Amino acid sequence: MAESTVATPGHDAIAPDGSFRTDVPARLDRLPWSRFHWMVVVALGITWTLDGLQVTLVGSLAGAIHESPSLRLTATQIGLTGSAYLVGAVLGALFFGWLTDRLGRRRLFFITLLLYIAASVFTGFTWDFWSFALARALTGAGIGGEYAAVNSAIQELIPARRRGTTDLAVNGTFWLGAILGAGVSILVLDPAVIDPEIGWRATFVVSGLLSLGVLLLRRHLPESPRWLMIHGEPGEASRIVGEIEKDVAREKGPLPEPEYGPVTLHRRGHIGIGEVVRAMFGSHRERTILGLTLMACQAFCYNAVFFTYALVLTRFYGIPSGQVPWFILPFAFGNLLGPLTLGHFFDSIGRRPMITLTYGMAGVLMAATGLAFAQGWLTAWEQTLAWTVIFFFASAAASAAYLTVGESFPLEMRALAIAVFYAFGTAAGGVVGPALFGWLIEGGERGDILWGYLIAAALMLIAAATEWKLGFAAEGKPLEAVATPLSAGRAGGGRGA
């Protein structure tokens, strides 16, 4: 079919009433997968790898940091620095998410990555509790801000037919970072290789500096044409799409015709917080309930197990703390394989059945594993294998939660919506889950911990039921059809709006 690299005459011109017609979404969605899309995935998807790396490093290096002669942190202060990271992530997500919708995706994913790099390097040079806690909070703020800016950009640049597969795969790379973190920890915790005091500091400095390469790669990414489109710059959006089309056509040959027509939008200013609240709790109330349920339930399940993983292994199975990273590796591989293996089914079979299935399987297996643990039927490696299977499904479910909240709301408020749900899930799961499991483990009774597993299982099953009831079909559909833009002049809402 003939290549089309420019908008149809008459498109993108703004009428006196502020309205315009644009075929930018259709042109982006018709593109075949190309080097451009790989660049988007690598340059932006690195966020989740960095988060997984940071979380795993701090957990695995906690002993070395605790024993650092310069920091002299107590066990309580180690815990508080973990909380500082979570608080920073929550506040960073909200603040930078708000800015991302106002100032654009591209500008923010540079700012947030620069903040992450600076804070990670700063961590390696901290000198006391307060400097270390500040460094962790700033690192969390950078990562939290990345989630909003990057999730928005990825969903808006990837063709509709591949959006689910890509989003799940990218979110799943958190566990690639966890694998790297566990591997690095095994190396730097070995006194025969490097002095642990130098090792843990160098790890944070190097992990930050390595991200400079990602910063250079992001220079080649454009602003999201969809963001420009809804902010009254359809001509610039069309020009950027034209450049992308030329590059893709040179690689793939003539492009297919768009599968749907132009959309009509109205030029408008920035969306206010009040309008966001009205959309979330008015026309999009069911989607808000669905997003909160999916995010909170998976966050509780994940953080409850992951943050107490080492405690269970050391207290109930007698595994030395220095050997814990070896048990994290298979767990992380299972988490990575889940989204990579199951992701394409979210585009082919559909969001609703697959999200229901993955949450449901994780809940059932969590309950079964809890009963086996309480009865003392499992060895340390069998326990690890059980966790690995559970989170093969739970990882795909958690990644789908981020996909769902990104697709649920209009383009004008997408980044802030992602930030709100990320912040809610991080705060709820990061505080309640680990605190509850830590308290249950402290009692030293397997029967007590069983209740924690059953609560996590019940929450995952509740999330599965909620998805089955309130879930909507987004597979293969343009974002503008899944949630009508506010600038279209009518409210997009409800289920499948």
Image: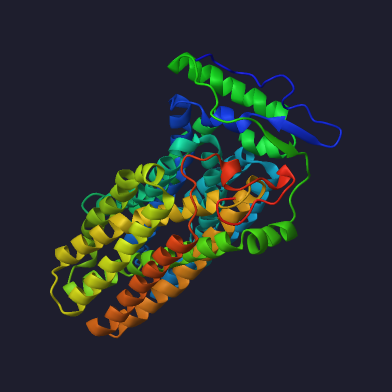
For the image, the number of numbered tags is 0
Residue 180 can be seen in this image? no
Q: Nearer the viewer, residue 321 or 354?
A: 354
Residue 480: x and y, percent? 60, 42
Q: In the image, 497: left or right of 58?
A: right
Q: In the image, 441: left or right of 218?
A: left
What residue sits 73% from the left and 57% below the top? 275
Q: Nearer the viewer, residue 189 or 424?
A: 424
Instruction: State how the image is colored.
Output: rainbow
Is residue 496 placed above or below 84 in the rendered structure?
A: above
Q: In the image, 133: left or right of 235?
A: left
Is residue 397 placed above or below 213 in the rendered structure?
A: below
Q: Nearer the viewer, residue 207 or 497?
A: 497
Q: In the image, 37: left or right of 68?
A: right
Residue 192 can be seen in this image? yes
Farthest-out residue, right: 16
What residue sits 53% from the left and 29% below the top? 259
What residue sits 65% from the left and 64% below the top? 281
Residue 115: x and y, percent? 56, 48
Residue 391: x and y, percent? 30, 59
The image quarter containing residue 308 is bottom left
Residue 65: x and y, percent? 37, 63
Q: Nearer the viewer, residue 200 or 144?
A: 144
